Image (cartoon, rainbow, N blue to C red):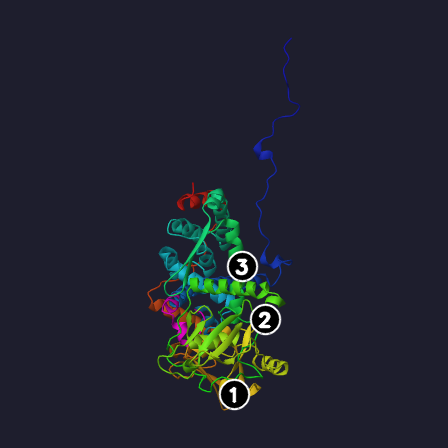
Amino acid sequence: MDLQYTPSHAPVRDAELPQVRAFEPPAASTRQFAHPDADVRMAERQRKEKALGALETQITELWGHINAATAHFLALVAEFDRREGWAQHGMASCAQWLNWQCGIGAVAAREKVRTARALEALPKIQAAFGEGRLSYSKVRALTRVAEAETEDTLLHIALNGTAAHVERTVRGFRRVKRDLERDEAEAMHERRYLDWRQDSDGSVRIEARLTPEVGELLRKALEAAHAQLDQRGGDADTSDAVPASVSAETSRTRPALPPCWTATPENVSAETPPRSAGQRRVDALEHIVQRFLAGAGSRSTAGAHEVVVHIAHDALCDVPESSGAEFDNGRPLAVETTRRLGCDGALVGVVEGAKGEPLAVGRRTRAVPPAIRRALRVRDGGCRFPGCDRSRYVHAHHIKHWADGGETALDNLVTLCSFHHRLVHEGGYGVHVDGGEIKFTRPDGRVIPAAGKEHGECFRGNTSAANGAQRVEALNTARGLTINAGTARCRWRGERMDYDIAIDALCRQAGYQ
């Protein structure tokens, strides 16, 4: 029996399907629910987006110009520091001059000088910085670790990454370097030594190799001492261990010293020799030793560590071929140096006659009366030398020396830090009162201005912010630079930074296996 499927209904033809009409938007007259201000709002939003885009372009382009100008500024600072232009103003360092003349904070000024010096050995980073492609934040981080071998890799990271990428890479590289160097600790321990010898001129040469832990202790001690000296102006403190130590010249009881001990030293150098980094470390070491000796003695041995200087009477009177001054052990000492040590050190001056008999013995310390010292602190607040901001470990200096009849009175006193106290006593710089104002002079007699002086082109015309930006752009254009909105933009597009690969490459380039 054959079975066949018979549909219950006939097939539906296309013509029989219901016709669906295409969608037609309602006529304009029927748009009763549309917001009447939609077009206006859309136009306003587009206008704001366009304005923000223009503002963004202005920011990034100006930042490129600022980068280039900052690079040029640091190049000028490096040249000024190398030529020691700051020394002519009696400044202790280039950073102190920047603080005085440019209004840069002390810490930021020191960092700028460090970066400027480091860039001179990194020409590729310096070039990218000068073209406006790198920011100062990136360059400052790069100069902490960059060397000739690693400069290319670090520059690539800086150009294609953010400042955060650069900072993290630098921190990681420094940490790995320390870990690799730790393997040599045992060999360093075996190679440790300390030797010294005395040269024919009496100076002492010291050479040492220390273990890492001892070297770290010494470094920390030197840093602490150096920080104190920075606060005081740069010289080792030879006074008693009192923060607000005062000059040994400020005494209510004056010893019978000859009146020919004048306040202005003769035959001093017209230029103040700047101190190198090595000299600063020696000053810090001297500071540590003096503090140790100051605390090593007891009442029964007070004076065992005092410095006694024998001063010939004819030397004070400037007699030719005089025997000058000398320590207890017979080593000679300049009279000007004796005068300075007597101001701020644990020094006993013994003035001797032609036969060596003592004519006058100075006291170990001399102090300004507390009331005058408080008034001096309120009036001066710190070192009065132009451009100096030291307020701790200062000295009370007699404008007219007490040996010349000067009184220990507020009108005859001025506060000086140790560094500038040295300049006034031995560097040929002068201090006097003119019309009720305290003025300082250079060795050539020129008065040092109390504030920074405006110089030519930097202060001409309108100094508004907009005008300043135009001047920066004009200066960069005059130097042949082409800077646009994309010059300073970071090239990072969100890729993951593999710090392990980057640091491993830096270690291999630096010679670490």
Q: Which residue is mark 3?
A: 221
- Residue 424 x, y percent position in the rendering: 45, 79
- Residue 403 x, y percent position in the rendering: 50, 85
Q: Depth check: give the residue in front, 353 or 449.
A: 353
Q: Nearer the viewer, mark 3 or mark 1?
A: 1
**SS label for mark 2:** loop
Q: Reading the chain from its start, which is encountered first: label 3 or label 1?
A: 3
- Residue 488 x, y percent position in the rendering: 43, 59
**SS label for mark 1:** loop
Q: Residue furthest right?
A: 8
Q: Nearer the viewer, mark 2 or mark 1?
A: 1
Q: Depth check: give the residue in front, 38 or 396.
A: 396
Residue type at tag 3:
Ala
Q: CA distance from mark 3 to mark 2?
A: 18 Å
Q: Which residue is mark 1?
A: 406
Q: Which residues are magenta?
A: 78-93
Q: Are marks 3 and 2 in contact (CB under 8 Å)?
A: no
Residue type at tag 1:
Gly
Report the quarter where the N terminus lies: top right
Q: Are marks 2 and 1 in contact (CB under 8 Å)?
A: no
Q: Which mark is residue 243?
A: 2
Is 302 situated left or right of 475 in this image? right
